[in-house]
Amino acid sequence: MLHYIRLLVFIILTTIAAIVFTTPLNILYYIFRISKQHKILIFFGRLTLKSILLIIKYIYNIDYKINGLEHLEELKNTPCIIAAKHQSFYETILLPMILLDYNIAGILKQELIHLPFYGYALGAFNNIFIDRKKPKKAMTKALLEIKRILDNNNPMSLYIFPEGTRTDIGDDTQYKKGILSLLYKKYNLPIIPMGLNSGLYFKYATSKPKKTGTIILEFCKPIPPGIKDDNLLLSTVKSAIENKTNELTQQL
């Protein structure tokens, strides 16, 4: 019963946060046509995401810690790829909030656009949306968007979940090489692997938290360009992500 009461409070408060913070963002972008990634949009985007994290903190007693930001700082002025582990809904909030400060866009699933308020807000930034039901068409569209983002005077970095979906702790998931390999080889971009331990606490936003505590997200040492073989690239990225994730999971 307590879980359902907390869940109801969570839904009410996050809905209020969405109305309060994404409404001005959406008005500024869709009505006044402010350019994507404008500072005022980033301001409201950060407020939206931060408010959700605070709601989670005070309702569920779950906070976060970020390690390895020095690796992002090293490449702050250089386009790169963030290859992130995906275990729960939590990193889909925390990761964008961190990366708003680093001129980094996400490669995300199409379904997120349909979220009330939040979906429209995602469209105000240079995110790329993938329709997983139409992979060939999605890849063609994604490549055009990637080209637009990278082939300009101020190229952005990109973050991606190479597993393609959420996974449980201990799952041996097959990483998808498509866009990751293309970005790395065609655009000669370094990759920053990212591990986490959010699966110890959550999976879905509506699921009962498994425990209280601190979710740790850690950026790893960059993998420089130069690996020619796709299988070697994928195994290198997977090893870095999984080793860091296992390390963070076993700390607690």
Image: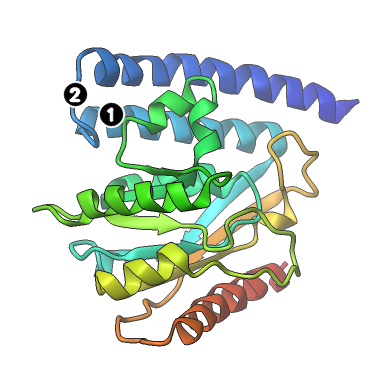
Nearest to N terminus: mark 1 or mark 2? 2
Q: Residue at x 67, y 74 (%)?
A: 246
- Where's the C terminus, which quadrant? bottom right
Which residue sits furthest left?
153
Q: Position of residue 8 (x, y in %)?
A: 74, 20
Disc 2 element:
loop
Q: State how far apart marks 1 and 2 are (Cα).
A: 8 Å
| Mark 1 or mark 2, whichever is nearer to me | 2
Q: Residue at x 73, y 57 (%)?
A: 200
Asked whether disc 1 touches disc 2, contact meaning CB atoms under 8 Å apart, the reply is: yes
Q: Position of residue 108 (x, y in %)?
A: 47, 46
Q: Position of residue 196 (x, y in %)?
A: 59, 62
Here the colouring is rainbow
**120 horizontally vs 114: left or right:** left
Q: Can residue 165 be seen here?
A: yes
Disc 1 target residue: 41
Q: Can residue 190 be seen here?
A: no
Disc 1 element:
helix
Residue type at mark 1 is Leu
**236 horizontally vs 33: left or right:** right
Q: Residue at x 55, y 76 (%)?
A: 238
Q: Which mark is residue 34?
A: 2
Q: Residues within 10 Å of mark 2 (few under 14, many from 20)?
A: some
